[in-house]
Image (cartoon, rainbow, N blue to C red):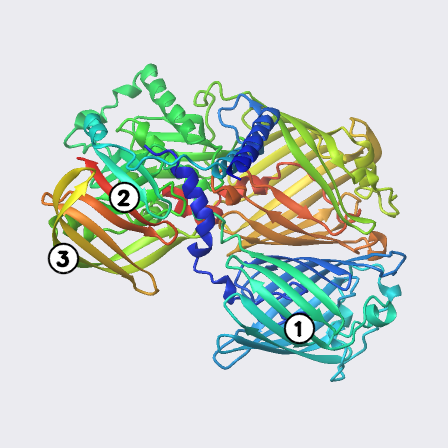
């Protein structure tokens, strides 16, 4: 069954390649905007989504590799899909760090708290972190409002308003990729002000305010991301 | 590192989108055999959510209905229906094909005590075999039960419970002929019937229905004997899936079984939430001027070498984002980028990505960025941002809103000089081999004819705004040439000889033309096109459009002199020539775009075209148009006047990845000679609309995307 499917897929990919040859645009323009490029990239997407990806070893990186690379590094897990990828720091704007994976997904964190995602599809356009970004490194309790923004299906900016409570839950030795950190576990519980949504984020914060591990809400479709700091 | 994330996230999102939105499709009104909210055959009063579209295929007693409808506004609903009735034997066809249009207006929305009340016109233009009007009230009783009751005229007056005003002639097979006239003189005339229905939601997905029908099917059942109507009661069951598909099965009129498949969808509910485009460049702010004054040095701009290094870096980095630099005006503190957007249907996304790249590559002393989008060589309204605003707002929760508020817009930016243009940008050539499809729909002899083939196109942009292009089509498979119908039109055969073009014009030259686009003045756009403009006409076309950035309206004028082309797709011309042209008004109001064109049409007839489109934020447009000219309905022939439906669909909606392909489709129930316009490529409104305020603000959320 699997083989038959794979063969069908191969045949289709062959057809796609043939079409690519036949329907290619010949242009001296640097960007191909033709409808063929859209059709072919769609065919490739369909083809590759039919091909089962090879199971990858987890975690996708070892402690030795991290130490050898010796650059700031995080590990992102998309819980709902089971995808895992490392990300390096791509940009720094005041207290916001933007991290990028090899395939072009970014997450932007402010003091470890998720501000935005890009490239996941139904991304988090932005999230307020006032209150959270002060209390989190200080490992103290706080209450604040949070606005999460998304681009809705009609392309408008949809804002979801939450009331949140951040509570320290005590000391915990947290192991992140074979490295033990003494942390305080912080629980952030958020409830939508005019709606049924709620989410609970968890952060494991070191004594210097570094968030070593976290599980943070992106939105309805993507669900939660787990973000671990592998290297300072 | 994982590289599989993109693909598996995609499949995840495809699977998960139903849950992504707050819509609960299964609590919506179910759809009747007539593709309106309703029971089995009888309508209910409920309106669908705003902007919802649906396709329905239904069949019973040898009658098949293919239908499309749109909830145009929260209260207004429109539908088109194409019906195939076997064994009809009217007017010499053994199978009869009928086209009809519906309109519904929901006058009262359901409240705690009030029912929802809707006034409906069924088949109000056309041959009128389904012609009926109704006033129906519907109410939910608890969560699971819906009741409806209504009064009907015309077809729905079969049981004539009341006598109404005026007369309504009985429908006879002989009368089913011309069609196309609005049946205004018979609306709400004649006897009045009564109908009622009850439906019960057994589970979230399953609905059972029972109704008492006031449609006696006199014509079909008694006169033509298509089926026996033994009972007034119809029964049915509908299964609704989470993403809006309905499967229905019915037992009708005591003698027939029926089946129905309905797809409900909404452009505002894309299959892929958000966009799968890779992440944009982050903005890394410049060091403070006080701490690092050296970084702000402007020495780079003194030398040609320094400037060209900056220019090359910007140009190459923009290409990574599928953006092209057409020109750059560079001062120590101000950069003006003339941008060709080759990647994004949403203009704000191109603006935001270009601004990010400018912040990533330009020297720190450049504080002001102006981005002028280019469309066919014309400057669109330009946006000026302060770099410090970009640095601040990239990480502000309301950063997109703030950037819009802080942007300065120039409606008619100055053109760039020769020296500022990228020297090797022009000429650029483009050869393209792409599939094409040409259709001829709703012909009574064969309602679906189509050719599929290859189009070979070549285009050269010789200079800014100067495009020479041509295309040849070669059919691979199709049956368009099987149409032996000879046009009986009394008007000049400007369109109705299409079977001759289809038969003789393969392979054929589709277009071979030169076009010049320019900006003749403040808020003005211009176009001149000459050559073989379309399959059937060659000549000269000129157009002028006045479209300021921030007005909801725009005015256009078009003047063409064209001569009819020979049928064989070659370069020869026939004798018929005409001066045709229109004055146009475009008006955008909230989610609607109205267009009125007044002028002379190809057959020399004078009149006006009215078009109304529902505009969705993501670029979808669903519209309908009708043309009324001084050609009488007799002269026009079947259909009485030109009318149709248009669909504009951004392909990125399906793929989730941005691109600039937004094809537009026009469907006409009939193509005749009256009210026909020239099909010239590159009309101005579509070229500039996406750069104007309404469209830009529709999608401004994508600025930081």
- Contact check, label 1 and label 3, Cβ < 8 Å: no
Residue to which mark 2 is pinned: B395
Same chain for the residues under marks 1 and 3 in the image: no
Q: Secondary structure at mark 2?
A: loop
- Contact check, label 1 and label 2, Cβ < 8 Å: no
Residue to which mark 1 is pinned: B235
The residue lying toward the viewer, choosing from B199 and B685, is B199
Picture coordinates of residue B410, whole percent (x, y): 43, 40
At 24% across and 35% down in the image, what residue appears? B285
Pointer 2 chain: B
Q: Secondary structure at mark 3?
A: loop
The relative height of residue A185 versus residue B47 in the rendered view (above or below) is: above
Mark 1 or 2: in front is 1
Category of crowding for the residue at label 1, using alpha-carbon neighbours closer than 10 angstroms: few (below 14), some (14–19), many (at least 20): many
Category of crowding for the residue at label 3, using alpha-carbon neighbours closer than 10 angstroms: few (below 14), some (14–19), many (at least 20): some
Which circle marks residue A141 in the picture? 3
The residue lying toward the viewer, choosing from B148 and A11, is A11
Q: Earlier in the sequence, mark 1 or mark 2?
A: 1
State whether residue B422 appears in this view.
yes
Pointer 1 chain: B
Picture coordinates of residue B554, whole percent (x, y): 56, 48
At 16% across and 45% down in the image, what residue appears? A174
Which quadrant: the N terminus of chain B? Answer: top left
Picture coordinates of residue B305, whole percent (x, y): 33, 15
- Left or right of A50? Residue B509 is right
Picture coordinates of residue B223, whole percent (x, y): 87, 70
Which quadrant: the C terminus of chain B? Answer: top left
Same chain for the residues under marks 2 and 3 in the image: no
- Left or right of B216? Residue B324 is left
Distance from disc 1 to disc 3, alpha carbons, whole Å, reads 61 Å
Distance from disc 2 to disc 3, alpha carbons, whole Å, reads 24 Å
Pointer 3 chain: A
């Amino acid at each position: 069954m699997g083989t038959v499917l794979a063969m069908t897929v191969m045949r289709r990919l062959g057809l796609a390649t043939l079409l690519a040859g036949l329907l290619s645009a010949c242009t001296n323009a640097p960007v191909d905007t033709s409808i063929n490029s859209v059709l072919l990239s769609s065919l490739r997407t369909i083809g590759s989504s039919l091909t089962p990806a090879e199971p990858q070893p987890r975690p996708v990186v070892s402690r030795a590799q991290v130490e050898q690379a010796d650059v700031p590094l995080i590990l992102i897990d998309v819980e709902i899909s089971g995808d895992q990828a490392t990300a390096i720091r791509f940009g720094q704007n005041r207290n916001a760090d933007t991290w990028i994976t090899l395939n072009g997904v970014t997450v932007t964190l402010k003091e470890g708290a998720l501000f935005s995602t890009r490239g996941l599809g139904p991304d988090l356009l932005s999230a307020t972190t006032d209150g959270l970004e002060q209390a989190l490194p200080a490992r103290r309790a706080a209450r604040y409002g949070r606005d999460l923004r998304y681009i809705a299906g009609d392309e408008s900016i949809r804002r979801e308003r939450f009331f949140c409570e951040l509570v320290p839950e005590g000391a915990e030795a947290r192991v992140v990729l074979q490295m033990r950190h003494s942390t305080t576990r912080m629980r952030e519980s958020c409830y939508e002000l005019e709606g049924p949504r709620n989410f609970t984020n968890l952060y494991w914060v070191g004594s210097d305010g570094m968030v070593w591990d976290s599980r943070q809400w992106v939105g309805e479709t993507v669900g939660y991301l787990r973000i671990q700091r592998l290297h300072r | 590192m994982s590289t599989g994330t993109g693909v598996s996230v995609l499949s995840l999102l495809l699977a998960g989108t139903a849950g992504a939105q707050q819509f609960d499709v299964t609590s919506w009104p179910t759809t009747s055999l007539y593709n309106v909210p309703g029971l089995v055959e009888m309508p209910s009063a409920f309106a669908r959510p705003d902007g919802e579209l649906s396709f329905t295929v239904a069949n019973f007693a040898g009658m098949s209905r293919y239908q499309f409808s749109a909830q145009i506004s929260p209260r207004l609903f429109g539908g088109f229906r194409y019906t195939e009735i076997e064994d009809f034997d009217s007017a010499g066809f053994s199978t009869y094909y009928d086209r009809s249009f519906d309109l519904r207006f929901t006058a009262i929305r359901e409240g705690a005590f009030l029912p929802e009340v809707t006034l409906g016109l069924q088949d109000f233009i056309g041959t009128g075999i389904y012609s009926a009007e109704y006033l129906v009230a519907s109410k939910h009783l608890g969560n699971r039960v819906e009741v409806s009751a209504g009064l009907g005229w015309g077809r729905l007056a079969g049981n004539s419970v009341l006598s109404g005003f005026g007369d309504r002639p009985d429908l006879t097979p002989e009368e089913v002929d011309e069609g196309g006239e609005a049946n205004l003189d018979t609306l709400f005339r004649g006897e009045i019937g009564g109908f009622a229905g009850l439906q019960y939601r057994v589970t979230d997905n399953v609905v059972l229905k029972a109704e008492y029908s006031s449609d006696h099917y006199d014509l079909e059942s008694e006169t033509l004997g298509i089926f026996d109507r033994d009972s007034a009661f119809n029964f049915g069951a509908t299964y609704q899936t989470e993403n809006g598909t309905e499967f229905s099965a019915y037992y009708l009129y005591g003698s027939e079984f029926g089946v129905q498949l309905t797809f409900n969808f909404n452009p505002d509910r894309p299959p892929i939430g958000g966009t799968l485009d890779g992440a944009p460049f982050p903005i890394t702010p410049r060091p403070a001027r006080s701490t690092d004054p050296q970084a702000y040095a402007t020495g780079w701009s003194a030398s040609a070498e320094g400037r060209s290094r900056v220019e090359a870096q910007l140009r190459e980095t923009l290409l990574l984002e599928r953006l092209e630099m057409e020109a750059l005006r560079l001062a120590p503190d101000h950069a003006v980028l003339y941008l060709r957007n080759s990647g994004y249907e949403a203009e704000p996304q191109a603006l935001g990505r270009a601004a990010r790249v400018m912040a990533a590559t330009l020297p720190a002393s450049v504080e002001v960025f102006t981005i002028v989008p280019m469309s066919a060589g014309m400057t669109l309204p330009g946006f000026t941002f302060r770099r410090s605003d970009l640095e601040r707002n990239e990480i502000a929760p309301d950063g997109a809103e703030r950037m819009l508020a802080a942007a300065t817009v120039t409606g008619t930016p100055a053109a760039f000089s020769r020296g500022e243009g990228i020297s090797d940008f022009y000429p650029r050539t483009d050869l393209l081999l792409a599939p094409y499809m040409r259709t001829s729909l709703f012909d009574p002899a064969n309602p679906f004819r189509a050719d599929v083939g290859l189009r070979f196109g070549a285009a050269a942009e010789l200079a800014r705004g100067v495009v020479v292009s041509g295309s040849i089509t070669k059919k691979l498979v199709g049956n368009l040439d099987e149409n032996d119908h000879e046009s009986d039109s009394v008007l000049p055969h400007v369109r109705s000889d299409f079977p001759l073009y289809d038969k003789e014009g393969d392979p054929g030259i589709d277009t071979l033309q030169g076009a010049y686009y320019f900006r003749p003045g403040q808020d003005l756009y211009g176009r001149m096109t000459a050559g073989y403009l379309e399959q059937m006409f060659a000549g000269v076309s000129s157009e002028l459009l006045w479209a300021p950035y921030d007005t909801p309206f725009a005015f256009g004028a078009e003047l063409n002199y064209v001569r009819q082309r020979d049928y064989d797709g070659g370069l020869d011309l026939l004798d018929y020539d005409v001066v045709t042209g229109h004055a146009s008004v475009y008006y955008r109001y909230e989610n609607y775009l109205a267009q009125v064109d007044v002028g002379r049409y190809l057959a020399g007839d004078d009149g006006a075209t009215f078009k109304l489109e529902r505009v969705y934020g993501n670029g979808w447009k669903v519209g309908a148009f009708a043309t009324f000219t001084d050609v009488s309905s007799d002269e026009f022939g079947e259909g009485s006047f030109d009318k149709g439906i248009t669909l504009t669909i951004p392909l990125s909606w399906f793929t989730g990845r941005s691109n600039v392909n937004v094809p537009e489709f026009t469907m006409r129930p009939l193509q005749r000679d009256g009210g026909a316009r020239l099909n010239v490529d590159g009309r101005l409104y579509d070229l500039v609309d996406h750069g104007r305020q309404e469209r830009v603000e529709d999608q401004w959320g994508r600025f930081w995307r």
